[in-house]
Image (tube, rainbow, N blue to C red):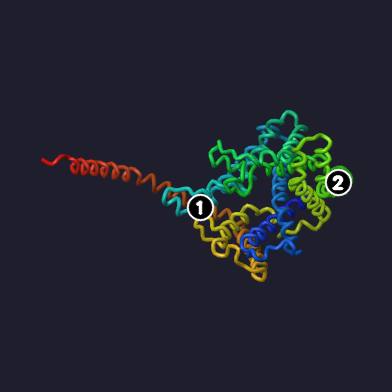
């Protein structure tokens, strides 16, 4: 069973979540005066911060698809399908929950920030999308990775076109999944492309992992593909534009971040595969398997979910590097420690929460009839008072 687990994938996910923690902390709290691209250290940090989200989305699609196809059952008989649907909806729910403001709820208001789309929304919807493709290609399993790869490439190719669309004809809650015009941090297009390509890579691992020299071949291929995408994809699209006259290819070349970041993802895959024998460290694996709780905890502390009282509110763009760097390290360590403590007591916590909701439900059922009777009596009294107040004076 141990040999079937891809430890380097858990390590990649752990690395990505730690990069996300320090990236969000530094980007949110570093004073604008120190944001200088001519400074090598800041420029390197900024580039590596841009790698985090593509790696996280790709790894999420990889892990989910790998678990989906490991079981012998296919189609709806696959138990991972229902688990995947549940997981996708759960991530959507948590995404909206983290953007809920308790003070707004008390006044029966949802602020505009509630409808913004973030990482969890897009990953949840990506999982649902992968399940949809899996079910659509269930009778032709070889078409599954091809469709996923095609979706990823097409989303990247047509990004210059659809990024200009405002989707004003959609309700804002739906439009935020497709455009950043209203303030969404991520959108399902093009980010589903990384998850879809991750799913296609998972199919390759599942089918060929037992082949002799699989890892040397895969590592070499990843290095070549990654380097090609980083250093030559822009020139390739410019050449396509000159040969075909299609301006879309020129637009890709002018802002070729999606394919370049995909190249970065392949290089990260190659590095982690190369050192895979050293990746099975218990702490690393625990962090990689606790990314959801780490994300939730960091969101509450940094952005102040529910109350609005987070570090971002009080220290936004106000810290110097002397403070923000050690602060980021402490923030990373604190979020990981709290997450691992939660994971160790997760069953107990969930039991307590379930017991609390049962108490609320029982109490409501017990006193609801009395409350409704009181409301009926009160409404009669109010109508009687208004009638007497408004009746003509004799």
Q: Which residue lies furthest to the bottom in this view?
A: 322
**Contact, mark 1 vs mark 2 (Cβ under 8 Å):** no
Quadrant housing the C terminus: top left
Q: Position of residue 319 (x, y in %)?
A: 62, 67
Q: Residues within 10 Å of mark 1 (few under 14, many from 20)?
A: few
Q: Is residue 35 above or below residue 228?
A: below
Q: Which residue is at 58% across, 56% downward?
A: 299
| Percent coordinates x, y for residue 120 in the rendering | 62, 48
Q: Does 344 appear above or below 330?
A: above
- Crowd class of label 2 (few under 14; some 14 to 19; many from 20; radius 10 Å): some
Q: Which of marks 1 and 2 is nearer the N terminus?
A: 2
What kind of element bears circle 1? helix
Q: Nearer the viewer, residue 211 or 388?
A: 388
**Residue under numbered circle 1:** 353
Q: Which residue lies furthest to the top in this view?
A: 139
Left or right: residue 38 compared with residue 164: right
User: Is residue 216 placed above or below 80 in the rendered structure?
Assistant: below
Residue at mark 2: 221
Q: Is residue 89 visible?
A: yes
Q: Closer to the camera: disc 1 or disc 2? A: 2
- Taking the image as shown, residue 178 lies to the left or right of residue 148, namely left
Measure the C-alpha gap from mark 1 to mark 2: 48 Å
Q: Where is residue 274 in the image (x, y as percent from the top left)?
A: 84, 54
Which of these two is toward me, 142 or 310?
A: 310
Image quadrant in which you'd find residue 29: bottom right
Q: Which residue is drawn at 67% across and 56% down?
A: 20
Can you say whether 62 is above or below 16 in the image? above
Number of numbered callouts drawn: 2
Residue 71 visible to the viewer: no
Horizontal and vertical percent position of residue 351:
53, 52
- Pick the front one: 325 or 179: 179
């Amino acid at each position: 069973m141990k040999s079937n687990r891809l430890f380097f994938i858990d390590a990649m996910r752990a690395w990505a979540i730690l990069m996300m923690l320090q990236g969000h902390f530094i980007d949110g709290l570093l004073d604008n005066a120190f944001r200088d691209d001519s400074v090598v250290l800041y420029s390197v940090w900024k580039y590596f911060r841009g790698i985090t989200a593509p790696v996280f989305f790709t790894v999420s699609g990889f892990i989910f698809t790998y678990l989906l196809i490991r079981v012998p059952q296919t189609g709806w008989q696959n138990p991972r399908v229902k688990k995947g649907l549940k997981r996708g909806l759960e991530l959507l729910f948590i995404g909206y929950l983290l953007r809920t403001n308790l003070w707004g709820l008390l006044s029966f208001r949802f602020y505009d920030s509630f409808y913004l789309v973030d990482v969890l929304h897009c990953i949840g919807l990506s999982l649902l999308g992968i399940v949809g493709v899996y079910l659509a290609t269930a009778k032709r399993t070889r078409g599954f990775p091809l469709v996923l790869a095609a979706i990823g490439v097409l989303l990247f190719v047509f990004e210059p076109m659809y990024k200009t669309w405002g989707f004003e004809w959609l309700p804002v809650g739906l439009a935020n999944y497709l455009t950043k015009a209203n303030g969404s941090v991520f959108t399902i297009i093009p980010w589903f492309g990384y998850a879809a390509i991750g799913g296609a890579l998972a199919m390759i691992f599942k089918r060929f992992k037992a082949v002799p020299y699989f890892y040397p071949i895969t590592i070499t291929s990843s290095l070549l593909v990654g380097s090609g995408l980083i250093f030559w994809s822009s020139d390739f699209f410019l050449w396509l534009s000159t040969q075909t006259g299609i301006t879309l290819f020129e637009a890709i070349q002018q802002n070729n971040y999606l394919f370049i970041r995909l190249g970065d993802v392949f290089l990260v895959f190659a590095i982690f595969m190369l050192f895979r024998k050293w990746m099975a460290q218990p702490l690393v694996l625990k962090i990689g398997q606790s990314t959801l709780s780490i994300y939730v905890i960091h969101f509450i502390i940094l952005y102040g979910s529910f109350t609005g009282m987070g570090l971002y509110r009080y220290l936004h763009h106000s810290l110097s590097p002397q403070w923000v760097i050690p602060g980021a390290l402490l923030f990373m360590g604190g979020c990981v420690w709290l997450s691992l403590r939660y994971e160790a007591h997760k069953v107990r916590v969930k039991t307590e929460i379930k017991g609390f909701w049962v108490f609320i439900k029982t109490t409501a059922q017990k006193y609801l009839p009395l409350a409704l009777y009181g409301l009926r009596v009160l409404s009669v009294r109010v109508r009687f008072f208004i009638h007497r107040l408004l009746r003509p004076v004799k």
